[in-house]
Image (cartoon, helix red, strand yellow):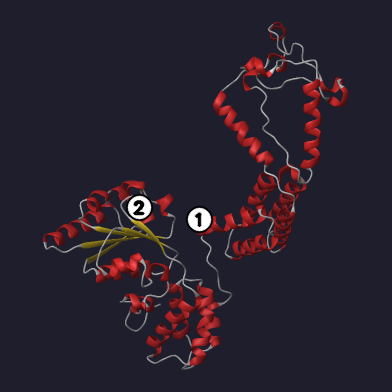
Amino acid sequence: MTTSSGRPLADLIRPRTLSEMAGQSHLLGESKPLRQMIEQGQLHSLILWGPPGTGKTTLARLIANHCQAEFVAISAVLSGVKDIRAAIDVARSNAERQLQTLLFVDEVHRFNKSQQDAFLPHVEDGTIVFIGATTENPSFELNAALLSRARVYVLKPLSSEDLVGVLARGLNMLAARAPFAEEISQLSLIAKVSDGDARLALNLLEISWTNRAQERLTEADITLVLGDGSRRFDKQGDIFYDQISALHKSVRGSAPDAALYWLARMLDGGCDPLYVARRLVRMATEDIGNADPRALQLALNAWDVQRRLGMPEGELALAQAVVYLSVAAKSNAVYSAWKQAQQRVVEHGSLDVPPHLKNAPTALMASLGHGEDYRYAHDFDQAFVPGERYLPAALGDPSFYEPTDRGLEAKIKEKMIYLRELNANSEFQRYRSDTAK
């Protein structure tokens, strides 16, 4: 959608001064280092990281204007090494005229390693001041070498108040007049749905204005365009992982209300409910374990319901599982024990199975001592062989699994203490721990 000038409204009202910039006060406040750097014309390479529509491109242009640098922009979505070389040639030409070049790379995370490396020597020798814009976590998407040469600044989603201010400026331009009070009030509907994205907000305003039924913009005009709306949910980016992290930590922290909120946010934003179900199984095993084994079964049941019935029946099963996991007794004892066992395998390599535990299906194997002196547990009281060993001697006497005092694990702990006392008091010892020293 474009205005009569042929340019989108979002481009027409792009801020031209720092005072017009909406939001980002944590970066552009009067005493903030970035604001001071811009006003003093002190350019340095940087990465602007933030959600769509938060002003990354606008801020890069403002920096170039304030610092009187030539602004050269390329998009990693459409460009390759050839385009990078062409931009560098322009920068060299500018340098000959003693003009500094600010090279802006939009969606810089879309460039591969070799393409990102192409910037390094030119940033290093001062041919360009590099500004990259990304919606993805630079730590994961950008080369360490590039990150070491550029400071990262995080842009935040715009608040509803900031968006209403931006929309009021846009409506002023569309209507060629100041917005009426009722129109200002109705702009909050767009701000709410836009979820911090100024570009999206202005696009929705432009569509609403173009299709309005009256001279003034009404709530009906806006509602017709907005429909049910949609909150931001990036199915592959940082917002995705931030929200699943919040859900997991809410469950771990026994906060059912918070866990339900993050579940609702994810499903509302379009997250695959089967992915959530799979993560609930992980939470049941990692953070609850044997403190309440029913949690794992309930998570699996919710997964099965979602797979069989889909939405909306499945979402209620997921909500039930989330609440149960949140209030269940917590233990990461199994998770911790598993990590220790894995580490011991790495440290000790492929230790041989003790001879008495080996199978002896042939006479040859029996003659080699396989299975010799093995004691069958069910022949003993409580199906337990005091003093028997089931680990290689080189491992000594590790205690990977240490049950907590919570939930069912309290009973398990009592049983393990009892069995260890039987081992300690047994006259039989397959081999003592000191033989491994």
Residue 84 screen position, x and y as percent: 25, 55
Q: Quadrant of the C terminus?
A: top right
Q: Nearer the viewer, residue 199 or 50?
A: 50
**Contact between labelled residues 2 and 1, with CB atoms less than 8 Å apart:** no
Does 317 sit left or right of 198 as displayed? right
Residue 316 seen:
yes
- Give the camera-side residue of 315 and 98: 98
Q: Where 324 falls versus 160 (above or below)?
A: above
Identify residue type, mark 1.
Answer: Gln
Q: Which residue is mark 2?
A: 111
Secondary structure under the numbered disc 2 in the rendered image: loop
Q: Number of callouts in the render?
A: 2
At 76% from the left and 46% from the top, the residue drawn is 406
Q: Which mark is residue 4?
A: none
Q: Residues within 10 Å of mark 2 (few under 14, many from 20)?
A: many
Question: Is residue 78 something that shows in the picture?
Answer: no
Circle 1 crowding by C-alpha within 10 Å: few under 14, some 14–19, many from 20: few
Residue 284: give x, y in percent of width and height: 69, 48
Q: Quadrant of residue 376?
A: top right
299 to the left or right of 380: left
**Of 129 and 320, which appears nearest the observer?**
129
User: In the rendered image, which residue does mark 1 sit on?
Assistant: 236
x then y, percent, for residue 40: 25, 68
User: Mark 1 vs mark 2: which is more N-terminal?
Assistant: 2
Q: Could you tell me which secondary element the residue under label 1 belongs to? A: loop
Residue 322, placed above or below residue 341 = below
Question: Distance of mark 1 from mark 2, alpha carbons?
Answer: 17 Å
Q: Amino acid at mark 2?
A: Phe
